[in-house]
Image (spheres, rainbow, N blue to C red):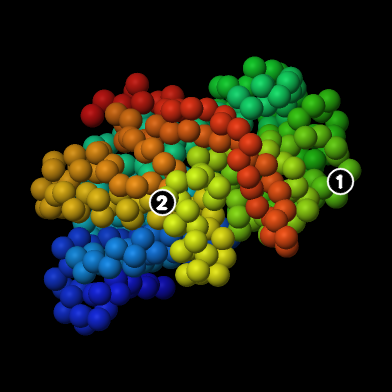
Protein backbone atom coordinates (compact mmCIF):
# COMPACT_ATOMS: atom_id res chain seq x y z
CA UNK A 1 0.00 0.00 0.00
CA UNK A 2 1.25 3.49 -0.80
CA UNK A 3 -0.10 6.80 0.38
CA UNK A 4 1.19 9.96 -1.25
CA UNK A 5 0.60 12.84 1.14
CA UNK A 6 1.11 16.49 0.29
CA UNK A 7 0.84 19.59 2.41
CA UNK A 8 -2.52 21.34 2.34
CA UNK A 9 -1.08 24.17 0.26
CA UNK A 10 0.34 21.73 -2.29
CA UNK A 11 -2.96 19.90 -2.60
CA UNK A 12 -4.73 23.17 -3.28
CA UNK A 13 -2.19 23.99 -5.96
CA UNK A 14 -2.90 20.67 -7.68
CA UNK A 15 -0.80 17.80 -8.89
CA UNK A 16 1.66 20.12 -10.60
CA UNK A 17 3.02 21.12 -7.22
CA UNK A 18 4.26 17.56 -6.61
CA UNK A 19 6.52 17.73 -9.63
CA UNK A 20 7.90 21.05 -8.43
CA UNK A 21 8.47 20.02 -4.80
CA UNK A 22 11.92 21.07 -3.62
CA UNK A 23 12.33 18.26 -1.07
CA UNK A 24 10.85 14.80 -1.43
CA UNK A 25 10.62 12.57 1.64
CA UNK A 26 10.11 8.83 1.62
CA UNK A 27 8.50 7.56 4.80
CA UNK A 28 8.76 3.81 5.33
CA UNK A 29 6.97 2.81 8.51
CA UNK A 30 4.77 0.10 10.02
CA UNK A 31 1.10 0.72 9.26
CA UNK A 32 -0.34 -2.82 9.41
CA UNK A 33 0.03 -5.93 11.53
CA UNK A 34 1.83 -6.07 14.84
CA UNK A 35 3.22 -2.73 15.94
CA UNK A 36 1.12 -0.71 13.47
CA UNK A 37 0.11 1.73 16.18
CA UNK A 38 3.72 2.86 16.54
CA UNK A 39 4.11 3.63 12.85
CA UNK A 40 0.73 5.33 12.68
CA UNK A 41 1.71 7.62 15.54
CA UNK A 42 5.05 8.52 13.93
CA UNK A 43 3.27 9.23 10.65
CA UNK A 44 0.55 11.31 12.29
CA UNK A 45 3.01 13.37 14.33
CA UNK A 46 5.17 14.01 11.26
CA UNK A 47 2.26 14.99 9.04
CA UNK A 48 0.77 17.26 11.70
CA UNK A 49 3.97 19.29 11.72
CA UNK A 50 3.95 19.46 7.91
CA UNK A 51 0.31 20.57 7.88
CA UNK A 52 0.93 23.24 10.49
CA UNK A 53 3.88 24.61 8.51
CA UNK A 54 1.64 25.04 5.46
CA UNK A 55 4.55 24.93 3.03
CA UNK A 56 4.40 23.89 -0.61
CA UNK A 57 8.02 22.82 -1.06
CA UNK A 58 7.73 19.43 0.65
CA UNK A 59 6.27 16.16 -0.62
CA UNK A 60 5.90 13.06 1.54
CA UNK A 61 5.45 9.58 0.07
CA UNK A 62 4.34 7.03 2.69
CA UNK A 63 4.73 3.25 2.46
CA UNK A 64 3.89 0.36 4.81
CA UNK A 65 6.84 -1.93 5.60
CA UNK A 66 4.58 -4.51 7.32
CA UNK A 67 7.40 -4.91 9.91
CA UNK A 68 9.30 -7.05 7.38
CA UNK A 69 12.97 -6.27 6.61
CA UNK A 70 12.75 -7.54 3.02
CA UNK A 71 9.73 -5.36 2.33
CA UNK A 72 11.49 -2.34 3.85
CA UNK A 73 14.53 -2.91 1.62
CA UNK A 74 12.35 -3.20 -1.50
CA UNK A 75 10.50 -0.01 -0.61
CA UNK A 76 13.73 1.88 0.06
CA UNK A 77 15.16 0.79 -3.29
CA UNK A 78 12.00 1.92 -5.07
CA UNK A 79 11.92 5.25 -3.27
CA UNK A 80 15.57 5.96 -4.07
CA UNK A 81 15.60 4.69 -7.65
CA UNK A 82 12.06 5.46 -8.88
CA UNK A 83 10.64 8.08 -6.56
CA UNK A 84 13.96 9.98 -6.40
CA UNK A 85 13.49 10.95 -2.75
CA UNK A 86 15.97 13.24 -1.05
CA UNK A 87 15.35 12.11 2.53
CA UNK A 88 14.17 8.85 4.09
CA UNK A 89 12.50 8.46 7.48
CA UNK A 90 9.88 6.50 9.43
CA UNK A 91 11.34 3.12 10.41
CA UNK A 92 10.23 1.86 13.82
CA UNK A 93 12.16 -1.40 14.25
CA UNK A 94 15.93 -1.68 14.60
CA UNK A 95 16.26 -4.81 12.44
CA UNK A 96 14.54 -2.93 9.60
CA UNK A 97 16.75 0.11 10.18
CA UNK A 98 19.86 -2.05 9.92
CA UNK A 99 18.56 -3.45 6.63
CA UNK A 100 17.80 -0.03 5.12
CA UNK A 101 19.88 2.80 6.59
CA UNK A 102 23.47 1.82 5.64
CA UNK A 103 22.54 1.31 1.98
CA UNK A 104 20.49 4.50 1.83
CA UNK A 105 23.19 6.72 3.31
CA UNK A 106 25.84 5.08 1.12
CA UNK A 107 23.83 6.29 -1.88
CA UNK A 108 23.98 9.87 -0.62
CA UNK A 109 20.50 10.02 0.86
CA UNK A 110 19.78 11.58 4.24
CA UNK A 111 18.08 9.37 6.82
CA UNK A 112 16.27 10.94 9.77
CA UNK A 113 15.26 8.31 12.31
CA UNK A 114 12.09 9.07 14.29
CA UNK A 115 12.52 5.95 16.39
CA UNK A 116 14.97 3.06 15.87
CA UNK A 117 18.45 3.82 17.22
CA UNK A 118 20.58 0.65 17.04
CA UNK A 119 24.01 0.82 18.63
CA UNK A 120 25.63 -0.28 15.36
CA UNK A 121 24.60 3.02 13.76
CA UNK A 122 25.73 5.14 16.72
CA UNK A 123 29.31 3.92 16.95
CA UNK A 124 31.57 2.46 14.28
CA UNK A 125 28.68 2.29 11.81
CA UNK A 126 27.74 5.96 12.10
CA UNK A 127 27.35 8.05 8.94
CA UNK A 128 27.35 11.76 8.28
CA UNK A 129 23.95 11.53 6.56
CA UNK A 130 22.27 9.61 9.41
CA UNK A 131 20.55 11.59 12.16
CA UNK A 132 18.57 10.02 14.98
CA UNK A 133 15.89 12.38 16.29
CA UNK A 134 14.65 10.04 19.04
CA UNK A 135 17.45 8.40 21.08
CA UNK A 136 20.08 5.71 20.87
CA UNK A 137 18.46 2.39 21.75
CA UNK A 138 20.25 1.97 25.08
CA UNK A 139 19.31 5.37 26.50
CA UNK A 140 15.88 4.87 28.07
CA UNK A 141 17.00 1.52 29.48
CA UNK A 142 20.10 3.13 31.00
CA UNK A 143 17.81 5.54 32.84
CA UNK A 144 15.70 2.60 34.03
CA UNK A 145 18.80 0.88 35.39
CA UNK A 146 19.86 4.05 37.18
CA UNK A 147 16.37 4.46 38.66
CA UNK A 148 16.26 0.82 39.81
CA UNK A 149 19.58 1.25 41.61
CA UNK A 150 18.52 4.55 43.17
CA UNK A 151 15.32 2.88 44.39
CA UNK A 152 17.33 0.18 46.14
CA UNK A 153 16.61 -2.82 43.94
CA UNK A 154 19.47 -5.30 44.15
CA UNK A 155 18.40 -8.36 42.15
CA UNK A 156 16.55 -7.72 38.89
CA UNK A 157 15.08 -10.22 36.45
CA UNK A 158 15.43 -8.72 32.95
CA UNK A 159 13.92 -9.71 29.61
CA UNK A 160 13.60 -8.37 26.07
CA UNK A 161 13.00 -9.68 22.53
CA UNK A 162 15.89 -11.27 20.66
CA UNK A 163 16.62 -8.56 18.06
CA UNK A 164 19.00 -5.57 17.96
CA UNK A 165 16.90 -3.21 20.07
CA UNK A 166 16.27 -5.94 22.64
CA UNK A 167 19.97 -6.60 23.03
CA UNK A 168 20.66 -2.86 23.29
CA UNK A 169 17.92 -2.61 25.93
CA UNK A 170 19.41 -5.15 28.31
CA UNK A 171 22.91 -3.83 27.68
CA UNK A 172 21.71 -0.34 28.59
CA UNK A 173 19.97 -1.48 31.78
CA UNK A 174 23.01 -3.45 32.93
CA UNK A 175 25.30 -0.49 32.23
CA UNK A 176 23.64 1.61 34.96
CA UNK A 177 22.14 -1.05 37.30
CA UNK A 178 24.48 -1.68 40.22
CA UNK A 179 22.83 -4.84 41.56
CA UNK A 180 22.80 -8.49 40.53
CA UNK A 181 20.69 -10.27 37.92
CA UNK A 182 18.25 -12.96 39.01
CA UNK A 183 17.76 -13.88 35.36
CA UNK A 184 18.32 -12.58 31.83
CA UNK A 185 16.01 -13.86 29.08
CA UNK A 186 15.58 -13.06 25.40
CA UNK A 187 12.11 -13.80 24.04
CA UNK A 188 10.96 -14.25 20.46
CA UNK A 189 10.13 -11.05 18.59
CA UNK A 190 6.35 -10.87 18.37
CA UNK A 191 5.80 -13.37 21.19
CA UNK A 192 2.42 -13.19 22.94
CA UNK A 193 2.52 -16.03 25.51
CA UNK A 194 4.79 -15.34 28.49
CA UNK A 195 3.76 -18.15 30.85
CA UNK A 196 7.23 -19.71 30.78
CA UNK A 197 9.01 -16.42 31.43
CA UNK A 198 6.67 -15.50 34.29
CA UNK A 199 7.29 -18.92 35.85
CA UNK A 200 11.02 -18.21 35.66
CA UNK A 201 10.50 -14.84 37.33
CA UNK A 202 8.47 -16.46 40.11
CA UNK A 203 11.21 -18.96 40.87
CA UNK A 204 14.15 -16.60 40.43
CA UNK A 205 14.33 -14.85 43.80
CA UNK A 206 14.26 -11.47 42.07
CA UNK A 207 13.25 -8.30 43.90
CA UNK A 208 12.28 -6.46 40.70
CA UNK A 209 11.53 -6.97 37.01
CA UNK A 210 12.78 -4.94 34.07
CA UNK A 211 11.36 -5.64 30.63
CA UNK A 212 11.47 -4.12 27.17
CA UNK A 213 8.58 -5.50 25.12
CA UNK A 214 7.24 -2.87 22.70
CA UNK A 215 3.78 -2.74 21.17
CA UNK A 216 1.51 -5.76 21.52
CA UNK A 217 4.24 -7.78 23.20
CA UNK A 218 4.16 -5.44 26.20
CA UNK A 219 0.38 -5.52 26.36
CA UNK A 220 0.37 -9.32 26.47
CA UNK A 221 3.12 -9.54 29.07
CA UNK A 222 1.64 -6.94 31.43
CA UNK A 223 -1.82 -8.51 31.38
CA UNK A 224 -0.43 -11.99 32.02
CA UNK A 225 1.93 -10.70 34.68
CA UNK A 226 -0.91 -8.92 36.50
CA UNK A 227 -3.00 -12.10 36.44
CA UNK A 228 -0.11 -14.31 37.60
CA UNK A 229 -0.06 -13.19 41.21
CA UNK A 230 3.66 -12.40 41.03
CA UNK A 231 3.96 -9.28 43.16
CA UNK A 232 7.33 -7.81 42.20
CA UNK A 233 7.75 -4.17 41.20
CA UNK A 234 8.16 -3.58 37.48
CA UNK A 235 10.41 -1.03 35.77
CA UNK A 236 10.56 -0.47 32.05
CA UNK A 237 11.07 2.00 29.24
CA UNK A 238 8.28 4.12 27.80
CA UNK A 239 7.89 1.72 24.87
CA UNK A 240 5.86 -0.65 27.04
CA UNK A 241 3.92 2.07 28.85
CA UNK A 242 3.19 4.56 26.11
CA UNK A 243 -0.12 6.26 25.50
CA UNK A 244 -1.53 3.84 22.95
CA UNK A 245 -0.49 0.78 24.94
CA UNK A 246 -1.85 1.95 28.30
CA UNK A 247 -5.46 1.97 27.17
CA UNK A 248 -5.17 -1.69 26.21
CA UNK A 249 -3.37 -2.67 29.42
CA UNK A 250 -5.60 -0.69 31.77
CA UNK A 251 -5.34 -0.82 35.55
CA UNK A 252 -2.65 -3.50 35.46
CA UNK A 253 -0.11 -0.78 34.64
CA UNK A 254 -1.04 1.70 37.38
CA UNK A 255 1.91 2.81 39.46
CA UNK A 256 4.55 1.32 37.16
CA UNK A 257 7.65 3.50 36.75
CA UNK A 258 9.01 3.91 33.25
CA UNK A 259 11.57 6.08 31.50
CA UNK A 260 11.15 8.47 28.57
CA UNK A 261 12.71 11.55 27.01
CA UNK A 262 9.20 12.96 26.45
CA UNK A 263 5.85 13.22 28.18
CA UNK A 264 2.76 15.29 27.62
CA UNK A 265 3.35 17.28 30.83
CA UNK A 266 6.73 18.72 29.80
CA UNK A 267 5.90 22.38 30.26
CA UNK A 268 7.12 24.40 27.31
CA UNK A 269 5.25 26.30 24.62
CA UNK A 270 6.07 23.87 21.81
CA UNK A 271 4.95 20.81 23.77
CA UNK A 272 1.80 22.41 25.14
CA UNK A 273 0.76 23.41 21.61
CA UNK A 274 1.66 19.98 20.23
CA UNK A 275 -0.40 18.06 22.79
CA UNK A 276 -3.40 20.33 22.21
CA UNK A 277 -3.20 20.30 18.41
CA UNK A 278 -2.52 16.56 18.11
CA UNK A 279 -5.49 15.78 20.36
CA UNK A 280 -7.71 18.09 18.31
CA UNK A 281 -6.50 16.71 14.96
CA UNK A 282 -6.69 12.99 15.76
CA UNK A 283 -9.03 12.66 18.73
CA UNK A 284 -6.47 10.97 20.98
CA UNK A 285 -3.58 11.95 23.20
CA UNK A 286 -0.17 11.91 21.50
CA UNK A 287 2.31 9.16 22.26
CA UNK A 288 6.07 9.15 22.54
CA UNK A 289 6.18 8.02 18.91
CA UNK A 290 3.95 10.88 17.77
CA UNK A 291 6.22 13.38 19.53
CA UNK A 292 9.24 11.90 17.75
CA UNK A 293 7.54 12.11 14.35
CA UNK A 294 6.59 15.72 15.06
CA UNK A 295 10.14 16.66 16.04
CA UNK A 296 11.57 14.86 13.01
CA UNK A 297 9.44 16.88 10.61
CA UNK A 298 10.28 20.15 12.33
CA UNK A 299 13.99 19.32 12.27
CA UNK A 300 13.76 18.64 8.53
CA UNK A 301 11.90 21.86 7.81
CA UNK A 302 14.35 23.87 9.91
CA UNK A 303 17.15 22.57 7.67
CA UNK A 304 15.13 23.36 4.54
CA UNK A 305 14.88 26.96 5.72
CA UNK A 306 18.67 27.26 5.87
CA UNK A 307 20.00 25.18 2.98
CA UNK A 308 19.16 23.47 -0.29
CA UNK A 309 19.05 19.68 -0.02
CA UNK A 310 21.11 19.46 -3.23
CA UNK A 311 24.01 21.04 -1.30
CA UNK A 312 24.70 18.04 0.91
CA UNK A 313 27.31 19.71 3.10
CA UNK A 314 25.17 22.76 3.82
CA UNK A 315 22.04 20.68 4.42
CA UNK A 316 23.94 18.35 6.74
CA UNK A 317 25.20 21.32 8.74
CA UNK A 318 21.68 22.71 8.96
CA UNK A 319 20.40 19.41 10.32
CA UNK A 320 23.24 19.19 12.85
CA UNK A 321 22.40 22.72 14.09
CA UNK A 322 18.89 21.50 15.02
CA UNK A 323 17.44 25.00 15.21
CA UNK A 324 13.81 24.13 15.85
CA UNK A 325 11.47 24.21 18.82
CA UNK A 326 11.48 20.64 20.09
CA UNK A 327 8.59 19.36 22.19
CA UNK A 328 11.30 18.12 24.58
CA UNK A 329 12.65 21.63 25.18
CA UNK A 330 16.40 21.86 24.69
CA UNK A 331 17.56 19.64 21.83
CA UNK A 332 21.09 19.09 20.55
CA UNK A 333 22.93 16.43 18.57
CA UNK A 334 26.14 14.85 19.75
CA UNK A 335 29.08 14.28 17.41
CA UNK A 336 27.51 11.01 16.20
CA UNK A 337 24.21 12.73 15.31
CA UNK A 338 22.28 11.24 18.25
CA UNK A 339 20.50 13.43 20.83
CA UNK A 340 21.98 14.70 24.06
CA UNK A 341 18.94 15.08 26.29
CA UNK A 342 17.24 14.61 29.64
CA UNK A 343 15.52 11.28 30.28
CA UNK A 344 12.68 11.28 32.79
CA UNK A 345 11.11 8.79 35.15
CA UNK A 346 7.34 8.58 34.69
CA UNK A 347 4.58 6.93 36.68
CA UNK A 348 1.44 5.41 35.17
CA UNK A 349 -1.64 7.18 36.51
CA UNK A 350 -5.32 7.46 35.67
CA UNK A 351 -6.98 10.74 34.70
CA UNK A 352 -10.73 10.17 34.53
CA UNK A 353 -11.18 7.25 32.17
CA UNK A 354 -7.75 7.67 30.58
CA UNK A 355 -4.57 5.90 31.64
CA UNK A 356 -1.50 8.05 31.09
CA UNK A 357 1.86 9.03 32.57
CA UNK A 358 3.19 11.84 34.71
CA UNK A 359 6.84 12.81 35.20
CA UNK A 360 8.05 12.22 38.76
CA UNK A 361 11.82 12.67 38.39
CA UNK A 362 14.70 13.22 36.00
CA UNK A 363 16.52 9.93 35.54
CA UNK A 364 19.53 11.17 33.57
CA UNK A 365 20.41 14.77 32.67
CA UNK A 366 22.02 15.90 29.39
CA UNK A 367 22.62 12.25 28.61
CA UNK A 368 24.63 11.11 25.60
CA UNK A 369 25.00 7.57 24.34
CA UNK A 370 27.88 5.22 25.10
CA UNK A 371 28.94 4.68 21.48
CA UNK A 372 29.70 8.23 20.33
CA UNK A 373 33.43 7.78 21.02
CA UNK A 374 33.56 4.99 18.42
CA UNK A 375 32.03 7.18 15.72
CA UNK A 376 34.60 8.58 13.31
CA UNK A 377 33.02 10.91 10.76
* Mark 2 and mark 1: Cα distance apart in space: 42 Å
**Mark seen at residue 270:** 2
Instruction: Report crowding for label 2: few under 14, some 14 to 19, many 20 or more residues within 10 A (C-alpha).
Output: some
Q: Residue furthest right?
A: 229
- Residue at image location 27% in from the left, 78% down from the top: 11
- Residue at image location 41% in from the left, 73% down from the top: 1
Position of 258 relative to 353 (above/below):
above
Does dot 2 land on a helix, a strand or a loop? helix
Quadrant placement of the C terminus = top left
Position of 308 relative to 137 (above/below):
below
Question: Of residues 208 and 34, which is closer to you in this image?
Answer: 208
The reply to whether residue 236 is visible in this rendering is no
Q: Is residue 23 left or right of residue 213?
A: left
Question: Of residues 166 and 311, which is closer to you in this image?
Answer: 311
Q: Where residue 13 appears, x then y in whole percent?
A: 20, 80
Instruction: Report crowding for label 1: few under 14, some 14 to 19, many 20 or more residues within 10 A (C-alpha).
Output: few
The reply to whether residue 238 is visible in this rendering is yes
Q: Is residue 169 left or right of residue 87?
A: right
Q: Where residue 321 appears, x then y in whole percent?
A: 24, 39
Does dot 1 land on a helix, a strand or a loop? helix
Question: Where, by quadrant of the figure, is residue 339 drawn?
Answer: top left
**Mark seen at residue 268:** none
Q: Where residue 29 appears, x then y in whole percent?
A: 43, 59
Question: Where, by quadrant of the figure, is residue 363 drawn?
Answer: top right
Q: Where residue 129 appears, x then y in whole percent?
A: 24, 42
- Residue at image location 33% in from the left, 35% down from the top: 333
Do the residues under discs 2 and 1 have CB atoms within 8 angstroms? no
Residue linked to disc 1 = 228
Amino acid sequence: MKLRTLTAAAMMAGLAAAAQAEVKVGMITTLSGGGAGLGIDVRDGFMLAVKQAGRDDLEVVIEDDQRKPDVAVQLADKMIQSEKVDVLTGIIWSNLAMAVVPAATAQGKFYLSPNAGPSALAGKGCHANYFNVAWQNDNLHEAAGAYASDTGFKNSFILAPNYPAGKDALTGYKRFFKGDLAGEVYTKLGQTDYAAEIAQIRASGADSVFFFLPGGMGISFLKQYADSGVDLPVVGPAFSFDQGILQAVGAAALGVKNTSQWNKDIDNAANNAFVESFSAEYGRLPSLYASQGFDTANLLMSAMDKADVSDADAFRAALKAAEFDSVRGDFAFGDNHHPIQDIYVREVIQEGDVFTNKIIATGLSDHADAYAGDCKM
